[in-house]
Image: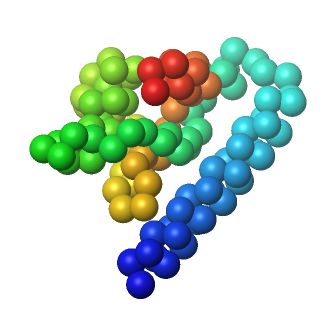
Protein backbone atom coordinates (compact mmCIF):
# COMPACT_ATOMS: atom_id res chain seq x y z
CA UNK A 1 0.00 0.00 0.00
CA UNK A 2 2.82 2.41 0.86
CA UNK A 3 4.48 1.71 -2.49
CA UNK A 4 1.26 2.45 -4.37
CA UNK A 5 0.78 5.67 -2.39
CA UNK A 6 4.36 6.80 -3.10
CA UNK A 7 3.96 5.96 -6.79
CA UNK A 8 0.69 7.87 -6.95
CA UNK A 9 2.18 10.89 -5.17
CA UNK A 10 5.22 10.82 -7.47
CA UNK A 11 2.90 10.75 -10.48
CA UNK A 12 0.92 13.71 -9.14
CA UNK A 13 4.12 15.68 -8.50
CA UNK A 14 5.37 14.91 -12.00
CA UNK A 15 2.04 16.00 -13.48
CA UNK A 16 2.22 19.27 -11.50
CA UNK A 17 5.74 19.86 -12.79
CA UNK A 18 4.60 19.27 -16.38
CA UNK A 19 1.65 21.64 -15.96
CA UNK A 20 3.85 24.37 -14.42
CA UNK A 21 6.42 23.85 -17.19
CA UNK A 22 3.77 24.28 -19.89
CA UNK A 23 2.59 27.53 -18.30
CA UNK A 24 6.18 28.73 -17.89
CA UNK A 25 6.93 28.01 -21.56
CA UNK A 26 3.78 29.89 -22.59
CA UNK A 27 4.86 32.85 -20.48
CA UNK A 28 8.34 32.82 -22.03
CA UNK A 29 6.94 33.03 -25.55
CA UNK A 30 5.38 36.42 -24.78
CA UNK A 31 7.59 39.53 -24.75
CA UNK A 32 8.87 40.08 -21.24
CA UNK A 33 8.74 43.52 -19.69
CA UNK A 34 10.85 44.61 -16.73
CA UNK A 35 7.81 44.44 -14.47
CA UNK A 36 6.89 40.92 -15.58
CA UNK A 37 10.40 39.63 -14.95
CA UNK A 38 10.16 40.65 -11.29
CA UNK A 39 6.76 39.03 -10.68
CA UNK A 40 6.70 35.83 -8.69
CA UNK A 41 5.03 32.59 -9.71
CA UNK A 42 4.81 29.27 -7.90
CA UNK A 43 7.51 26.79 -8.91
CA UNK A 44 8.17 23.24 -7.74
CA UNK A 45 11.81 22.70 -6.77
CA UNK A 46 13.13 19.16 -6.36
CA UNK A 47 16.02 18.74 -3.92
CA UNK A 48 18.13 16.01 -2.43
CA UNK A 49 16.77 14.57 0.79
CA UNK A 50 18.15 16.39 3.83
CA UNK A 51 20.44 14.64 6.29
CA UNK A 52 18.63 12.37 8.74
CA UNK A 53 19.00 14.86 11.59
CA UNK A 54 17.43 17.78 9.67
CA UNK A 55 13.72 18.30 9.12
CA UNK A 56 12.80 18.58 5.42
CA UNK A 57 11.05 21.94 5.85
CA UNK A 58 14.09 23.41 7.62
CA UNK A 59 16.30 22.20 4.77
CA UNK A 60 13.93 23.70 2.20
CA UNK A 61 13.85 27.06 4.03
CA UNK A 62 17.66 27.07 4.28
CA UNK A 63 17.92 26.33 0.53
CA UNK A 64 15.47 29.13 -0.32
CA UNK A 65 17.17 31.57 2.08
CA UNK A 66 20.45 31.09 0.21
CA UNK A 67 18.79 32.70 -2.82
CA UNK A 68 16.27 35.04 -1.23
CA UNK A 69 18.70 36.49 1.32
CA UNK A 70 16.92 35.74 4.59
CA UNK A 71 15.05 33.04 6.46
CA UNK A 72 12.07 35.39 6.80
CA UNK A 73 11.86 35.89 3.01
CA UNK A 74 12.20 32.13 2.51
CA UNK A 75 9.33 31.41 4.92
CA UNK A 76 7.13 33.95 3.12
CA UNK A 77 7.92 32.43 -0.30
CA UNK A 78 7.51 28.78 0.75
CA UNK A 79 4.15 27.39 -0.33
CA UNK A 80 4.57 23.70 0.54
CA UNK A 81 7.29 21.24 1.56
CA UNK A 82 7.17 17.82 -0.08
CA UNK A 83 8.47 15.13 2.28
CA UNK A 84 7.07 11.71 1.46
CA UNK A 85 7.50 10.45 -2.10
CA UNK A 86 9.81 13.21 -3.22
CA UNK A 87 11.99 15.81 -1.59
CA UNK A 88 11.38 19.36 -2.60
CA UNK A 89 9.14 22.35 -2.17
CA UNK A 90 6.94 24.77 -4.01
CA UNK A 91 7.68 28.46 -3.61
CA UNK A 92 6.86 31.84 -5.08
CA UNK A 93 9.92 32.84 -7.11
CA UNK A 94 10.82 35.31 -9.84
CA UNK A 95 12.43 34.00 -13.03
CA UNK A 96 15.82 35.25 -11.81
CA UNK A 97 15.42 33.41 -8.50
CA UNK A 98 14.48 30.23 -10.37
CA UNK A 99 17.68 30.55 -12.38
CA UNK A 100 19.77 31.10 -9.21
CA UNK A 101 18.29 28.16 -7.33
CA UNK A 102 18.68 25.91 -10.36
CA UNK A 103 22.42 26.57 -10.32
CA UNK A 104 22.64 25.67 -6.63
CA UNK A 105 20.87 22.32 -6.91
Q: Quadrant of residue 13?
A: bottom right
Specify the farthest residue to the left: 53
Q: Quadrant of residue 25?
A: top right
Q: Residue at x 82, y 39 (%)?
A: 26
Above or below, 47 against 101 in this view is below
Residue 38 location in percent, x, y? 60, 22
Is 18 placed left or right of 91 in the picture?
A: right
Specify the farthest residue to the bottom: 1
Specify the farthest residue to the top: 34
Residue 104 location in percent, x, y? 45, 21
Q: Nearer the viewer, residue 72 or 84?
A: 84
Q: Nearer the viewer, residue 1 or 100?
A: 1
Q: Nearer the viewer, residue 100 or 28?
A: 100
**Residue 46 appearing in the image:** yes
Q: Residue at x 77, y 46 (%)?
A: 22
Q: Nearer the viewer, residue 40 or 84?
A: 84
Exactly how many numbered labels are in the figure? 0
Residue 90 location in percent, x, y? 47, 46
**Residue 97 appearing in the image:** no
Q: Residue at x 27, y 22 (%)?
A: 70
Q: Residue at x 43, y 54 (%)?
A: 86
Quarter of the image with the N terminus in it: bottom left
Amino acid sequence: MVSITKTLLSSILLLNLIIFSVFAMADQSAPESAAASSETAVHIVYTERPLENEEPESYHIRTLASVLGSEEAAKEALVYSYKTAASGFSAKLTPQQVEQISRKL
